[in-house]
Image (cartoon, rainbow, N blue to C red):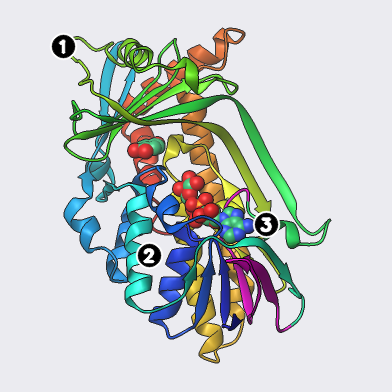
Amino acid sequence: MGRTQVGIVGAGPAGLMLAHLLHLRGISSVVLEARSRDYVEQRVRAGVLEQGSVDLLVESGVGDRLQREGLRHEGIELRFAGESHRVAMTELTGRAITVYGQQEVVKDLIAARLAAGQPIVFEVDDVAVHGLDTEQPSITFTHEGRDETLTCDFVAGCDGFHGVTRGAVPAGVLSTYDRVYPFAWLGVLATAPPAVDELIYANHERGFALYSMRSAQVSRLYLQVAPDEDIDDWSDDRIWAELRARLETVEGWSLNEGPVIEKGITPMRSFVVEPMQWERLYLAGDAVHIVPPTGAKGMNLALADVRLLGDAFAQWYAGGGGGLLEAYSSTALRRVWRAQHFSWWMTSMLHRFGDSDPYQARLQLAQLRNVTTSTAYARALAENYVGPVEV
Ligand code: APR
Ligand code: PHB
């Protein structure tokens, strides 16, 4: 396989965007991905881009389809106690979010990579990293039955929560901070025209529900379920009945139903590993931090990490020294922890935590009342949701 400047493990938003940013600066990289191109392009994930993420994609030349097809949203709705309240994000912050599926971002980045004639190797196996504490680390893997070695100056671990790069750091170096929630999300993609044009986050005694969308024809919906829920127990009829029960609490409001195209269960977890770097290994995205999806921050954090890394490698290769590389972990962690707090807070405010804590249920309603009656609270939510300008 030879050598490259930065070896990138993982072709999710983090790995692909980093490869793109490096290419724009004339820095070579090779992206190694365990799955097939088709798999990563079809995998349904979240779909909310902060203003800063949109700006990054547009400014780096991969935002054309996003600007044509992305849905710009200037508010979200909070639904609880049979009432509906709008948080006017753009009025409160001057910024907006854009709904555009993560796999669409992945498709656009893969297309840009291939158009530039730059390497991505799909369907690699047995990836292992070596010599991270030397000046020439390497990545070994198998591809099409052959053993390969890629030598590089740096390794970028962008291989998600279940990846292998984080595990290459010696024991005792990394600290883990995490929280597991007593529920999961059942996510549904359906051919049904969205009944509204803004997202609805609903706190309901049967559990949380989220109404989102992908286009004028496709709705994206989520239901809080038990962490050990069996997806086979959720027929289309049951899914729609539960969505109706949790969302049709506002008079005169009803869902549009249609065939379910895709459904899956996602566990809910908060997770951070510190520091985000060891010697010549730089970790980014889900490989070092996970947020519960309630704050819609996962893809945005991945992109924010690699924006920093792109600048840091550019400084290094331009002969400007390792200042930004050294600062990478502590700079990135400020945004990471801000998003951890916001995601935990949204999650805590909106989900049902079981019958055992009626006090918490009352606190949730008090919090929701604060957010929907006080401009200061509403602005705090909105600023975090659209994404911080400076962290
Ligand atoms: N070798 C090569 N590739 C690997 C390996 C491995 N050992 N392990 C995992 N991968 C690949 C996965 O197949 C995946 O394509 O790494 C990629 C990691 O991508 P993501 O999981 O999308 O992570 P990231 O790029 O950090 O993006 C974070 O993804 O899970 C969502 O909510 C999350 O929106 C956030 C985003
Ligand atoms: C989505 O549209 O997939 C989505 C939207 C908002 C979230 C999470 C997921 O908080």
Across and down, in percent, residue 358 comes to 55, 8
Quadrant of ligand 2 in image: top left
Q: Earlier in the sequence, mark 1 or mark 3?
A: 3
Is residue 22 visible to us here?
Answer: yes
The residue tagged 1 is 252
Secondary element under disc 1, as helix, strand or loop, is loop
The residue tagged 2 is 110
Q: Earlier in the sequence, mark 2 or mark 1?
A: 2
Task: Find residue 91 and report its image quarter.
Answer: top left
The magenta-colored residue range is 135-162
Let me know if residue 142 is in the magenta part: yes
The residue tagged 3 is 164
Q: CA distance from mark 3 to mark 2?
A: 22 Å
Across and down, in percent, residue 344 comes to 53, 35
Dot 2 beta carbon under 8 Å from ligand 1:
no
In the displayed structure image, the side of residue 111 where residue 158 appears, left or right: right
Is residue 391 visible to us here?
Answer: no
For this orientation, the residue located farthest to the front is 145
In the image, what residue type sits under mark 3? Answer: Val
In the image, what residue type sits under mark 1? Answer: Gly
Label 2 environment density (alpha carbons within 10 Å; few <14, some 14–19, many ≥20): many
Label 3 environment density (alpha carbons within 10 Å; few <14, some 14–19, many ≥20): some
Dot 3 beta carbon under 8 Å from ligand 1:
yes
